[in-house]
Amino acid sequence: MKDYSSVQAKSYVARQEGALKKYFFWQEERLIFQYTPIRGRTVLDLGCGTGRLTASLIDQGAAEILACDINTDMVEIAKQRHQGGNITFFEADATSLPQDDATVDVLLNIGVFEFIKDLTPFLTEMYRVLRPNGDLVFTCWNSKRWYRSNFLDGRKYGSVDHSVDEISELLQENGFSVSRVETIFFLPRRLFWIGYKLCFTQFMKMGFVAICNILSDCLRRIPILRKKGWVVVMFARKA
């Protein structure tokens, strides 16, 4: 797992408010909340980081928000950013959660599996804490994406790709049924940031991000490309 220092965690918060939020995060969150009912349910944000999803979960009407991360600095910053009676932030290892069995309605795991090679211990623990018919939603990098280039993707050495077929099989082995699979076509990160930084005004930057979002949508809707996006968003249910 990637470990963030306090300085890195604070820097990550600042980045979340810019293009990262309006492009990469926006694409993921739109799909997550489009296909996952949140209102009135207990939601566990596993790998919450600095509380990226917290405000959206509040807006979606979650009855209770449980948000955890293995990194102390991330959790402390998340606590500072979001305070409220129905939110609990805590530090925990995702393979050994403090929750009782069958106490969570929705479990979100966004941007974590790209750091994990063996998913079985995590899926086992997710199954344990979810209620019957509870929803599991997660993202991962797609090993079957349209093209693969670590240089253009701007990824660190050691990050892990997973395929839809591989994860679907793992989910079934661990008691889940797959309800939906989506992929997202991002412009490779290195190319995106080059294009974004070449925009001299805020108006140009907004236009560039809007064009990238439209292009992502168009590619995702082409049937032959549906499973070829850079990032997989998988929706599963505890049997």
Image (cartoon, rainbow, N blue to C red):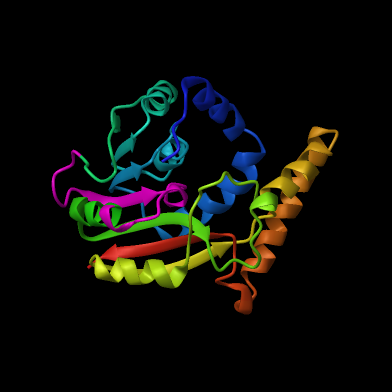
- Residue 191: where, in percent of width, then height? 75, 49
- Residue 119: where, in percent of width, then height? 34, 56
| The quadrant where residue 186 appears | bottom right
Residue at 45% across, 53% down: 33
Residue at 37% across, 70% down: 168
With 124 as the anchor, is 14 left or right in this view?
Answer: right
| Observer-nearest of 77 and 144 | 144
User: Which region is colored magenta?
Assistant: 98-121
| Observer-nearest of 23 and 3 | 3
From the image, which quarter does the N terminus lie in?
top left
- Residue 214: where, in percent of width, then height? 71, 58
With 208 as the anchor, is 168 left or right in this view?
Answer: left
Residue at 20% across, 50% down: 129
The residue most toward the left is 100
- Residue 118: where, in percent of width, then height? 35, 56
Number of labels in the image equals: 0
With 107 as the anchor, is 188 left or right in this view?
Answer: right
